Image (cartoon, rainbow, N blue to C red):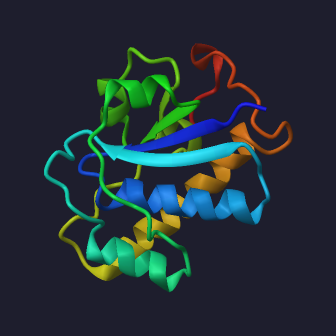
Amino acid sequence: MKRKKVLFICSGNTCRSPMAEAIFRSEIKRRKIKFVDTASAGIFAENSRCINEKSAACLTEAGIDFSKFHPRQLKHKMLENSFIVICMTRSQSELLNSFDNVYSMEDIAGFEIPDPYGQSLDVYRKTAEQIKAAVDKIIDRFFSQQNGSEPSDKNNQNKGE
C-alpha cells in the first residue's frame, strides 16, 4: 500500500504546525494506523531555525517526541506529494487554493488554530489541546474506518464537520 503524507502548514513552522505534526504522528502510532506519514512546513519559514521553546515545552509535557523536527519552508513539491495539506487558518488555505488537497483546520475541525507566538505557556497549552482535538477529527475523517481512503471531492464535502 502506498504511504500517504499529511502536511501541516502554519506561518513560520515553529509553533503550531510542528505541534500538529508531532501530535498527529504520536496519535497515528498509538492507534496503529499504517502507511501514513506526517510533516510540517511554514509559508514564511525561510529564517526559522528551531521549534519554539513553548511549543517544545507543551510537547515534552505531553510525552510527545519531536526530536527529529526541523523547520522547513513550504515548497510546491511538498503540496503535490501530500495526500492532504492542513493549514491552521482559512487565510493560509486560501493562499494555496489551487490545490484540491488543501484544507483549513476550520474545514475539518470547525475551528481555526490561532497563532500563540509571543504569548504565555498557558496559551500554548490551549493551542496544543485544540490541535489534539483537531487531530482526532482529521484521523476520524480520513483514516479511521477505511484506514487512509482517498478524500472525496473537496467541493462536495460538508465543511466544518
Question: Which image quadrant for residue 104?
Answer: top left
Q: How many marks?
A: 0
Q: In this view, does 140 lie to the left or right of 125?
A: right
Asked if one can make out residue 31 in the rendered structure from this viewpoint, the answer is yes
Q: Percent from the top left, x then y, of residue 51?
A: 30, 66
Which of 60 and 69 lies nearest the eye of the viewer? 69
Return the x and y of residue 63 as percentages of the image width and height.
56, 81
Residue at position x 33%, y 58% from top? 70
Relative to 34, is 150 above or below? above
Where residue 29 sits in the image (x, y, percent)? 71, 61
Q: Nearer the viewer, residue 97 or 36?
A: 36
Tell me if residue 133 can be seen: no
Using residue 34 as the reference point, say whether residue 58 is left or right of it.
left
Figure quadrant of the C terminus:
top right
Could you tell me which quadrant the N terminus lies in?
A: top right
In this rendering, would 25 be left or right of 54? Answer: right
Occupied quadrant, residue 124: bottom left
Q: Residue at x 55, y 41 (%)?
A: 6
As drawn, which residue projects farthest toward the right?
A: 145
71 is higher (above) or lower (below) than 127: above
| Residue at image coords 66%, 62% | 27
Residue 97 in the image, given as x and y percentages of width and height: 38, 19
Q: Where is residue 36, by image quadrant?
A: top right
As drawn, the residue found furthest toward the left would be 47
The residue at 46%/82% (across/down) is: 60
Out of 129 and 73, give the one closest to the viewer. 73
For the residue pair 1 and 93, the one nearer the viewer reads as 1
